[in-house]
Image (spheres, grey):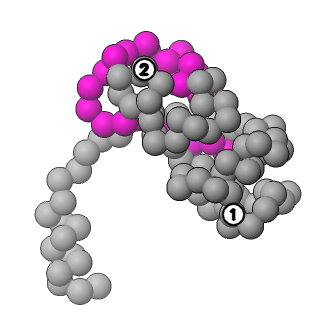
Amino acid sequence: MSAQIRHSIASAVPSTITGIKLSVPELFAQPEFISWLNNSQAMTWHSRQGPVSEGDIADVAIFVDPSMTGEGSDSDMPGWEHVVDKLRVAIGQGPFSGNHFIVILSNS
């Protein structure tokens, strides 16, 4: 590792994030969700080449605004409002301040 990379990482200010992980393999079986995923900018392990095959690790990371008003990086995702509702149950109604909350949607 170069000295510049080592210094960059060593001097970075850490920021704590809060989130939840949901195991929702049924979501990954929905054609409208897969269509959204294949055309989205969401962070995922999925290759965006079609359906999620059995055995694929296709976890998706989405970000919910701390205001808890329903805004976020992927608010056009099918089922978004249900994810926000689940997050509110898990961490509280908000509004909060600070970083976005991360939600990992897992197909396993």
Tell me, yes or no, whether the highlighted magenta stretch contains residue 88: yes
Point out residue 37 in the picture as x, y percentages from the top left corner: 66, 51
Would you say residue 82 is visible in this rendering?
A: yes
Distance (Cα) linking label 2 and label 1: 29 Å
Q: Quadrant of residue 91?
A: top left
Q: What quarter of the picture does the N terminus occupy?
A: bottom left
Q: Residue furthest top?
A: 93
Amino acid tagged 1: Arg
What residue does disc 2 label? 69
Q: Residues within 10 Å of mark 2 (few under 14, many from 20)?
A: few
Question: What SS does tag 2 mark?
Answer: loop
Point out residue 10 in the picture as x, y percentages from the top left corner: 18, 66
Residue 92 circle label: none
Point out residue 20 in the picture as x, y percentages from the top left corner: 52, 34
Q: Is residue 15 above or below residue 100?
A: below
Would you say residue 108 is visible in this rendering?
A: no
**In the image, what residue occupies the spot 68% across and 67% down?**
47
Q: Which residues are magenta?
A: 83-106
**In the image, what residue occupies the spot 26% across and 32% down?**
98
**In the image, what residue occupies the spot 46% across and 42% down?**
73
Q: In this image, 96 relative to 12: left or right?
A: right
Q: Is residue 24 above or below residue 1?
A: above
Q: Quadrant of residue 2?
A: bottom left
What residue does disc 1 label? 48
Question: What SS does tag 1 mark?
Answer: loop
Point out residue 86 in the picture as x, y percentages from the top left corner: 58, 22
Amino acid tagged 2: Thr
Looking at the image, tell me whether mark 2 or mark 1 is earlier in sequence order: 1
